[in-house]
Image (cartoon, rainbow, N blue to C red):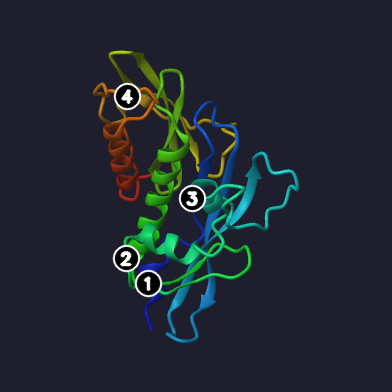
Amino acid sequence: MIKYSSLYTMIGRYYPFFLNNGNLENHYLYVFDSPGINEETGNPTFTMRKVSDRSSRKDGKLGNGLDILNYVFGSPKYPVVGRVEQITKDLMRKKTPIVTQKGMEFPRVDVQNLSLQKTLLINLRGSLRNRHYRYNPGRFIDVLWTPTEFVVFKIVGDKDGVSLSPIAAYKNLDVGMIDPLPVDLEKLEYKKDKFQIDANGKSSNLSMVIKEMEWQSFERKNFVK
């Protein structure tokens, strides 16, 4: 039996998924959850449960845990149903995890090590940015900064290149960005380079930098306890 103490540090943590970076208004909020034990392996399982939804959905339902996967990897005409298990494995960059899925729930993953949870989160957010974000000046970027907080950067620059300028930090639960944290943004350490963007507002180099910053979030101390 795998010990809970070494694997469950992300259980109960909330993570925002903003659906575009024009104004960071529409979003889903998910929490890592443990639905129980895999009876076949005896190992605990983890999943992501949607707890908040501000989007274009008309029914107002929170029960569709597949919403984030559909938004990133599907479309109204081609939903992800039937591909969920493979998409989840691809996000974790592993062939071995046992992934099960039923109904409209986010898939359950047999816990093998904590890196699966981290990799799933970072790659899912990276895939969201790759499909729906643009890096044109005036837009915004939300970056996971600590285990429970994120920083919002404004994209500044011109045709010669763009860079990031931090404007506020928030708790992950504060997806409405109502209560900015008392943070000295000038002390944040991040790459202040200029990045070239293409005609579609994309930049592979900036995407990699943001992903690297988010990987570092697991090791940083929280701004506020």
39 to 142, vertically: above or below: below
Q: Residues within 10 Å of mark 3 (few under 14, many from 20)?
A: some
184 to 218, vertically: above or below: above
Three-letter residue code for mark 3: Phe
**Marks 2 and 4, how far apart at CA:** 31 Å
Q: Are marks 1 and 2 in contact (CB under 8 Å)?
A: yes
Of the residues tagged 2 and 3, which is closer to the observer?
3
Of pointers 1 and 4, the one earlier in the residue sequence? 1
Three-letter residue code for mark 4: Ile
> Closer to the camera, 212 or 76?
76
Q: State which quarter of the image contains the C terminus.
A: top left
Three-letter residue code for mark 2: Lys
**Marks 3 and 4, how far apart at CA:** 23 Å
Q: Residues within 10 Å of mark 2 (few under 14, many from 20)?
A: few
> Closer to the camera, 84 or 177?
84
Of pointers 2 and 3, the one earlier in the residue sequence? 3
**Marks 1 and 2, how far apart at CA:** 7 Å
Q: Which residue is mark 2?
A: 94
Q: Position of residue 204 (x, y in %)?
A: 29, 35
Q: Which residue is mark 3?
A: 73
> Closer to the camera, 43 or 61?
61
**Which labelled disc corresponds to residue 197?**
4
Q: Residues within 10 Å of mark 4 (few under 14, many from 20)?
A: many
Three-letter residue code for mark 1: Pro
Residue 224 visible in rendering: no
Q: Which residue is mark 1?
A: 97
Of the residues tagged 1 and 4, which is closer to the observer?
4
